[in-house]
Image (cartoon, rainbow, N blue to C red):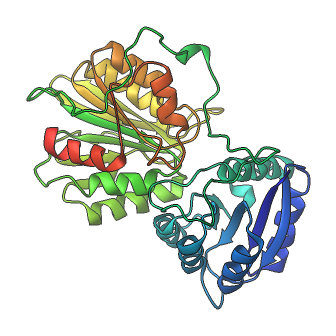
């Protein structure tokens, strides 16, 4: 049974273009369209789609308001279409806070100049989003006890990373603990956090809970477009008691500062005597993740072995798993977000399956233990 899609946009041309791109995949079926947010609410409750594509700026009711109204009564994964501008970034973050699962650029050529490849990526994203299960931000209702599936037969299939020879499960490693972390005074000199889908809201929750005197510097790696990381760093800085900024090449790593890896580039920790700083450089052609969590984690392991805490939050795929394994071997501590509070559990579960996780926590406990123990 194909995944049922509701397409919401005030542009008839854009709705038609989305329909054409989805028509090539038999696993997807468009069951309805809506030209504004109010129609989207009505159609969502009437048609019960498995996934919704939602524009942000529309007449009558905008996409953010429509997302809130839909999710208040009926859970369905929502993929936002966003313009890759400063204003578009801010609106997208608001949509994610409202409950949207993920986003894509509205101009498809911004993630692929190949029309066929752009359509393929859109289909893949929708199928992945459709498998996202309800998480703790949305209480279960009698109307929808389980999330829709992207596979025939309607069976719920959680997202799991593909097994890879570089992060095969370590059968001898003990399972991660859910108890309070054991951290000696002065043990943690730096905290590195990697995340992807669902990460903006998770990072906001964690960083806003930290006290102003939180000592270890932080490196943040969020899979995000180039034009989004600057506004996101500003957003975090405005809601946190510590300082947050988009990293620039040569920025010093210091207490009370969180550096966010810029989109489209890579960020590594480097050392010069007693001074630590970040090296930010363009991502190489063909690299899947820009920024890449593994690259930053491995640089932390090389320059601050055994003195770091690495945290892997919600996200698709397995980025961060190899880096976490290297950090673990060098004596660092690894925390991961639990499945119940992750929007997508792929990245955390890959670290657990590789035997690299020391602790697994709900997002609120990660914030609490960072503030209290680290």
Q: Identify which residue is drawn at 59% across, 63% down.
A: 84
Residue 270 is drawn in which quadrant? Answer: top left
Residue 271 is drawn in which quadrant? Answer: top left
Say if 102 sits above or below 353 in the image. Answer: below
Front residue of 141 and 2: 141
Give the left or right position of residue 252, taking residue 360 as reference.
left
Q: Identify which residue is drawn at 35% across, 57% down.
A: 204
Say if 305 sits above or below 140 in the image. Answer: above
Q: Is residue 247 visible?
A: no
Residue 155 is drawn in which quadrant? Answer: top right
> Residue 357, position in %: x, y?
38, 25
Identify the image quadrant of the C terminus: top left
Q: Identify which residue is drawn at 37% across, 15% down.
A: 174
Say if 240 sits above or below 270 in the image. Answer: below
Q: Is residue 344 visible?
A: yes
> Residue 281, position in %: x, y?
46, 37
């Amino acid at each position: 049974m194909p995944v049922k899609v509701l397409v919401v946009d005030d542009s008839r041309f854009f709705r038609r273009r989305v329909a054409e791109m989805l028509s090539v995949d038999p696993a997807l079926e468009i069951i309805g369209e809506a030209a504004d947010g109010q129609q989207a609410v009505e159609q969502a409750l009437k048609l019960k789609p498995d996934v919704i594509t939602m524009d942000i700026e529309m007449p009558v009711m905008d996409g953010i308001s429509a997302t809130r109204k839909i999710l208040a009564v009926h859970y369905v994964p929502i993929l936002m279409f966003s313009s890759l501008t400063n204003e578009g970034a801010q609106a997208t973050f608001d949509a994610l806070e409202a409950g949207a699962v993920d986003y894509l650029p509205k101009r498809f050529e911004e993630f692929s100049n190949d029309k066929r490849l752009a359509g393929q990526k859109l289909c893949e994203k929708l199928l992945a989003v459709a498998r996202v299960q309800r998480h703790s931000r949305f209480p279960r209702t009698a109307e929808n006890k389980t999330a829709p599936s992207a596979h025939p037969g309607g069976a719920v299939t959680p997202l799991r990373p593909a097994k890879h020879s570089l992060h095969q499960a370590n059968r001898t490693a003990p399972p991660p603990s859910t108890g309070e972390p054991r951290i000696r005074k002065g043990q943690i000199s730096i905290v590195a956090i990697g995340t992807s889908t669902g990460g903006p809201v998770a990072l906001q929750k964690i960083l806003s809970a930290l006290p102003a005197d939180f000592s270890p510097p932080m490196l943040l790696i969020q899979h995000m477009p180039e034009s989004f990381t600057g506004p996101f760093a500003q957003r975090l800085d405005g809601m946190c008691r510590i300082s947050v900024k988009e990293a620039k090449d040569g920025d010093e790593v210091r207490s009370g500062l969180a550096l966010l890896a810029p989109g489209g580039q890579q960020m590594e920790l480097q050392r010069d005597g007693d001074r630590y700083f970040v090296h930010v450089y363009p991502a190489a052609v063909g690299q899947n993740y820009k920024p890449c969590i593994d690259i930053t984690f491995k640089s932390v392991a090389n320059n601050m072995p055994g003195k770091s805490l690495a945290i892997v939050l919600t996200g698709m795929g397995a980025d961060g798993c190899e880096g976490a394994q290297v950090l673990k071997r060098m004596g660092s501590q690894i925390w991961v977000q639990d499945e119940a509070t992750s929007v997508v559990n792929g990245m955390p579960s890959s670290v657990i399956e590789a035997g690299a996780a020391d602790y697994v926590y709900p997002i609120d406990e990660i914030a609490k233990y960072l503030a209290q123990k680290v």
